[in-house]
Image: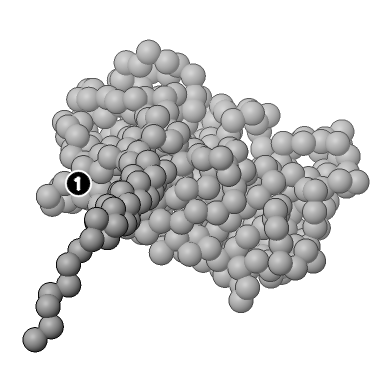
């Protein structure tokens, strides 16, 4: 029978050294990891879904408010109202504002939107607005994540099928699992530098549908903005598949301010600013970017116009009035002056913020039915609106106010 092996002093020293090295490695990984700077408090179950309101109330009064500078409009998803500030995204009870769940990082938020019954939060690190987290809207549970090159400032929007992250030199489109479907514009380390159709362009605006991605850009040596229409889901996400691209016709040289108002199916609506021979107007373009028709606007457009897209109407706030666009053809239907924002649908009517409160408009004609008095500290727009059951939420500058 062999004698049992005995550990020598050297063996113990080596084992202790290995254990210490493992502890140090784990500590270094922890201090450098995203998890160290993340707080995630989830809800045990999602709140009850909002029941669609059958009538517009006679009165509306504030029931809660919260700071939310990282959102552009009130967000409601999974039965919860979502606010965002600093590095925190918070799901709240829509009736009381009570915190239901919280996801917070030691990074600043670039933007937050909702899509696919989820929250998509974009954070800034040394690579720009590159760290993206997807959260369950009802519980705040962390789902998909991604990390890629991005500009230092981006706008984050959703069309219901894709989420777009748009900076001034680079655009990405993501599907519901946060897999990128399109990379457009600047690429720091391209595998094939000729995959992008142009270089050095400034990206101005973008809009998308399930079948088209439209981008406005200003490229070196061109007299006006360029409209590019492409496939939102090409075979190679690094190689844009263009259906058409051309400099906007009828826009005077050097005139800036064009914006994409919406994309529906294969049609793109673009605000065309006034020039020497033409006033401000809305231009409609087909699936290859060719101009189809134009509609004159009654007045100038402000520097911060806002589009709101719903299932039954698309509204565009010009800075002074609301213009209703058809959901399928994007053609203007009517305009309502004196608005402070694009409004939202409740019980078949359109609620539009105005100086004295909330105007209730006939959805098909824009006729004023009545005005609900609402007191506000601010009388300037944009004020963006979202309806959740019988609760009306307004984003006023950097705060969300719930009314009932």
* Residue 140 picture location, percent across and down: 25, 48
Secondary element type, mark 1: loop
Q: Which residue is mark 1?
A: 42
Q: In the current view of this chain or complex, which residue is farthest to the bottom?
A: 1
Question: Going 42% across and 15% down the picture, which residue do you hit?
Answer: 378
* Residue 221 higher or lower than 375, as above or below: below
> Does the rendering let one see residue 52?
no
Q: In the current view of this chain or complex, which residue is farthest to the right?
A: 221
Q: In the current view of this chain or complex, which residue is farthest to the top?
A: 377
Quarter occupied by residue 394: top left
* Residue 327 picture location, percent across and down: 49, 56
> Does the rendering let one see residue 11?
yes
* Residue 173 picture location, percent across and down: 55, 58
Colouring rule applied to residues:
one colour
Instruction: Name the one closer to the observer, 385 or 65.
Output: 65
Quadrant location of the N terminus? bottom left
């Amino acid at each position: 029978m062999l004698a049992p092996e005995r550990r020598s002093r050297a063996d113990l020293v080596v084992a202790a050294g290995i254990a210490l090295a493992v502890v140090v490695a784990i500590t270094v990984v922890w201090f450098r990891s995203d998890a160290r700077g993340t707080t995630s408090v989830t809800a045990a179950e999602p709140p009850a879904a909002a029941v669609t309101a059958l009538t517009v109330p006679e009165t509306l009064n504030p029931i809660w408010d919260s700071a939310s500078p990282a959102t552009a409009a009130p967000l409601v998803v999974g039965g919860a109202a979502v606010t965002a500030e600093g590095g925190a995204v918070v799901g709240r009870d829509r009736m009381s504002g009570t915190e239901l769940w919280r996801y917070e990082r030691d990074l600043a938020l670039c933007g937050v939107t909702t899509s696919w019954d989820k929250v998509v939060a974009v954070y800034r690190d040394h690579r720009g607005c590159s760290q993206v987290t997807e959260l369950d809207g009802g519980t705040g549970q962390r789902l998909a994540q991604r990390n890629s090159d991005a500009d230092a400032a981006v706008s984050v929007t959703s069309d219901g099928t894709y989420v777009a992250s748009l900076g001034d030199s680079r655009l990405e489109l993501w599907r519901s699992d946060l897999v990128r479907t399109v990379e457009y514009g600047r690429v720091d380390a391209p595998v094939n530098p000729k995959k992008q159709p142009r270089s050095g362009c400034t990206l101005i605006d973008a809009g998308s549908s399930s079948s088209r991605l439209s981008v406005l850009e200003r490229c070196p040596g061109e007299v006006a903005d360029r409209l590019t229409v492409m496939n939102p889901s090409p075979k190679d996400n690094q190689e844009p598949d263009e259906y058409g691209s051309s400099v906007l016709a009828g826009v005077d040289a050097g005139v800036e301010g064009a914006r994409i108002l919406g994309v529906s199916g294969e049609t793109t609506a673009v605000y065309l600013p006034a020039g020497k021979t033409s006033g401000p107007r809305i231009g409609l373009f087909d699936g290859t970017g060719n101009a189809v028709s134009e509609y004159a606007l009654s007045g100038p457009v402000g520097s911060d116009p806002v589009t709101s897209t719903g299932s039954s109407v698309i509204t565009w706030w010009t800075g002074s009035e609301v213009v209703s666009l058809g959901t399928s053809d994007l053609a203007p239907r009517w305009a309502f002056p004196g608005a402070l924002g694009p409004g939202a649908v409740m019980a078949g009517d359109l609620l539009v913020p105005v100086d004295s409160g909330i105007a209730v408009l006939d959805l098909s004609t824009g006729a004023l039915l009545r005005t609900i008095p609402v007191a506000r500290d601010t009388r300037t727009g944009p004020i963006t609106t979202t309806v959740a059951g019988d609760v009306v939420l307004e984003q006023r500058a950097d705060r969300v106010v719930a009314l009932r």
